[in-house]
């Protein structure tokens, strides 16, 4: 029996014409959500457009008895993001769930060969698209005091070996996630914003050759990632502002925090003092995850009124 259902909920899933996005959309719909399936239908490198991908996913949902609409607008523009949300609002009157999955990988290769256009495309779709869709639904969710946003980051955030635009974009997705989650928590809003780093077969892994594609499809199918997205998108979402590595039948919390480090009594360090106490900064046994940027600053003894900062930025 499916205990986690989505009847009465409306979801938007971007980049849902295939792969991971399709898996997210299909799972949410199978458990009762009405789903707006968004996909520009371009290549993995961000070229072209073909609405048949979004239409195919939406039709597959309807064929199984679910309710879905297709959308071919681009997340890379404000107009496109607003049109995506407007279509869901016009059809169903609300948006409860947003899964920001759309992304491209363009600027791969030696850094000296990466163009401004490639950089702008990488950032504009994954990070910019996440920002624009969140902005388009945020006031609606804020005023209703309900929302579940799941942003799709990437393990490339840890380093990709080749290319900086995609890791930078996915790092920005994590920053957006933490920023919105912190804002919601500070005001006691029932709007949860979390992120995942999926490990799964995709159009990108397919480009690596048939042997890698076959192994990834066997060991890391897209369907294996969707249940974590499902829980984070549910009423019973157990967390806010978290990120998880997900794939191949498992998941783990991803932490970006600080160690206890060295807190000198003198407010001005010297290079020698840094060198002498470097091991303390690298001591993971004192690691903690600040609730926000100011909690990290509070670890330093000072006379600064950090609550005044919170009131100013809140």
Image (cartoon, grey):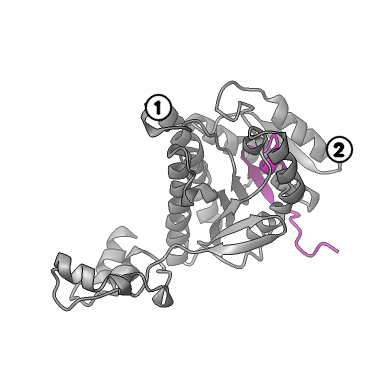
Q: Mostly what secondary structure, the magenta segment?
A: loop
Q: Which mark is residue 30?
A: none
The residue drawn where x is 58% and y is 59% is 244
Range of magenta residues: 1-22
Q: Tell me how far mark 2 sits from mark 1, CA to CA.
A: 46 Å
Q: Residue 113: which numbered mark, if any?
A: 1
Q: Is residue 237 left or right of residue 140?
A: right
Q: Nearer the viewer, residue 295 or 250?
A: 250
State left or right for residue 158 relative to residue 222. left
Residue 153 appears in the picture as rendered: no
- Position above or below: 196 against 21: below
> What residue does disc 2 label?
63
Residue 151 as seen in the image, left or right of residue 33: left
Q: Mark 2 or 1, which is nearer the eye?
A: 1
Can residue 9 be found in the magenta stretch? yes
Residue 303 in magenta stretch: no
């Amino acid at each position: 029996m499916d205990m986690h259902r989505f009847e009465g909920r409306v979801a938007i899933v971007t980049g849902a014409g295939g792969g991971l996005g399709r898996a997210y959309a299909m799972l949410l719909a199978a458990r009762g959500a009405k789903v707006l399936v968004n996909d520009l239908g371009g290549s993995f490198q961000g070229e072209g457009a073909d609405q048949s991908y979004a239409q195919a996913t939406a039709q597959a949902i309807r064929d199984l008895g679910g309710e879905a609409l297709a959308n071919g607008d681009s997340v890379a523009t404000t107009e496109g993001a607003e049109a995506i949300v407007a279509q869901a609002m016009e059809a169903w009157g609300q948006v409860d769930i947003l899964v920001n999955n759309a992304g491209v990988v363009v600027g791969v290769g030696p850094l000296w060969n990466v163009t401004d256009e490639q950089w702008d495309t990488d950032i504009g779709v994954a990070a910019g698209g996440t920002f624009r869709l969140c902005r388009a639904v945020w006031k609606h969710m804020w005023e209703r005091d309900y929302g579940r946003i799941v942003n799709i980051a990437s393990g490339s955030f840890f380093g990709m070996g080749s290319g900086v635009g995609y890791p930078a974009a996915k790092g920005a997705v994590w920053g957006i996630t933490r920023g919105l989650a912190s804002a919601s928590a500070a005001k006691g809003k029932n709007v949860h914003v979390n992120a995942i780093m999926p490990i799964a077969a995709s159009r990108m892994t397919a480009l690596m050759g048939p042997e890698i594609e076959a192994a990834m499809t066997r060991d890391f199918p897209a369907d294996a990632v969707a249940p974590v997205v499902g829980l984070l998108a549910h009423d019973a979402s157990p967390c806010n502002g978290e990120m998880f590595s997900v794939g191949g039948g498992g998941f783990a919390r991803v932490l970006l925090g600080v160690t206890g480090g060295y807190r000198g009594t003198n407010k001005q360090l010297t290079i020698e003092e840094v060198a002498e106490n470097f091991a303390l900064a690298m001591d993971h046994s004192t690691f903690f995850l600040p609730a926000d940027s100011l909690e990290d600053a509070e670890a330093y003894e000072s006379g600064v009124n950090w609550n005044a900062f919170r009131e100013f930025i809140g």
